[in-house]
Image (tube, rainbow, N blue to C red):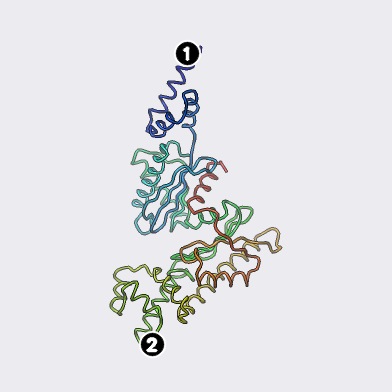
Amino acid sequence: MIATEVLKRKRFIETIFSTENSLLATRTLIAFPSKYRYYAACSMTKKFVIGIDGGGTKTTVVLADLQGNVLAEETAGASNFLIIGVEKAAEVLYAAADACCRKAGLSFDHVEALAAGLTGAGRASDQQRMRDGLEHYAKAQGSSLNNVIIESDARVALEAAFKGAAGMILICGTGSIALGKSSDGRVFRVGGWGRIIGDEGSGYTIGREGLNAVTRQLDGRAKKTLITELVAKNLKLKTQEDIIAAVYRENLDVATVAPLVVEAAEKQDSDCERILNKATFELTEHVRALTLAMEHAARDRARQKILLAFIGSIIASENVFTNILKHKIMFSLPQITIVQPKAPPSYGAVLLALQSSGSS
């Protein structure tokens, strides 16, 4: 009887270890004494989730168990499907997720759910397009992805900032948007209209107004401003021809000018101080409108403390812009408490994957 049981366990282990999970299997054999190998092999049947934060410059993938413990991470290039297309974005996401699984010696067969927060995926139609594209690409590679969730990058950032709890985030990167989550799980949004008709206070808007200050000086329509010198020094844009070529023919990332505006404002350049003052007013209005919407929807209309986290390259660090913004928000909205995000956006995608799998 004992010999039969041992034989069954031996065959079970060999079956598990003969899969493409050989890397983890080998580590398990080395790490565990023989009497524990059966239980180690059993752990190979566990399920996991994948969370992805995909943007215009970088994609971060996280593999976690059903308790939310991070097991592996992987980074890749841009995955903004609105710019590189659904098929190319699907290729980037799949390759990065596959590499992350392989780091842990696993395959997609062990993945219970995959959630991706992607730039540009704020609408249901775009989410469906990207979901279909990723599932189709995976199938073409001989894999099957179960339970794929596509959300916006802002949505996963909100989930990560408070690890699934209620709160509010203000995102100011290339664009601008404010999202809030109530204690009953409802999500509220202000902004995120894009640079043509929205994105007030964003890096794009600040950068555009900074370049506009440069063009007015070069035309002789305005006085000298420090931003002209900084743009010439850092971006090598010194003349009208340089600027027009960079913006209209070479697709200059206008948001890259924003840090130069902040730098000039820190040196008390009046034009750049004016630009930042206007931007902080607009961002404060995002927060005000979102606060009113959340308070109006709350069952208890009494004013309650709301946590707010700043997200995005421009307001993530301490500088004159962030300081002005914090002062305006705290002065006009005393119920707001500004805090640091609890986790990176990729972990917010993990939390959404866990929710979808019923593990949270």
Nearest the camera: 122 or 45? 45
- Residue labelled with disc 2: 221
Question: In x, y percent, where is residue 178?
Answer: 54, 63
Nearest the camera: 314 or 152? 314
Question: In x, y percent, where is residue 330?
Answer: 61, 69
Say which amino acid is labelled 2.
Answer: Arg
Q: Secondary structure at mark 1?
A: helix
Please state, as top left, top right, bottom left or bottom right, where the C terminus lies in the image. top right
Question: Label for residue 3?
Answer: 1
Can you say whether 187 is above or below 140 in the image? below
Label 1 environment density (alpha carbons within 10 Å; few <14, some 14–19, many ≥20): few
Question: In x, y percent, where is residue 141?
Answer: 34, 40
Marked residue nearer the N-terminal end (2 or 1): 1
Residue sitting at 41 percent across and 73 percent down? 260
Residue sitting at 41 percent across and 43 percent down? 100
Residue sitting at 63 percent across and 69 percent down? 333
Can you say whether 49 is above or below 297 in the image? above
Q: Which tag is nearer the camera, tag 2 or tag 1?
A: 1
Question: Label for residue 249?
Answer: none
- Between the residue at mark 2 and the residue at mark 1, the CA separation in whole angstroms equals 93 Å
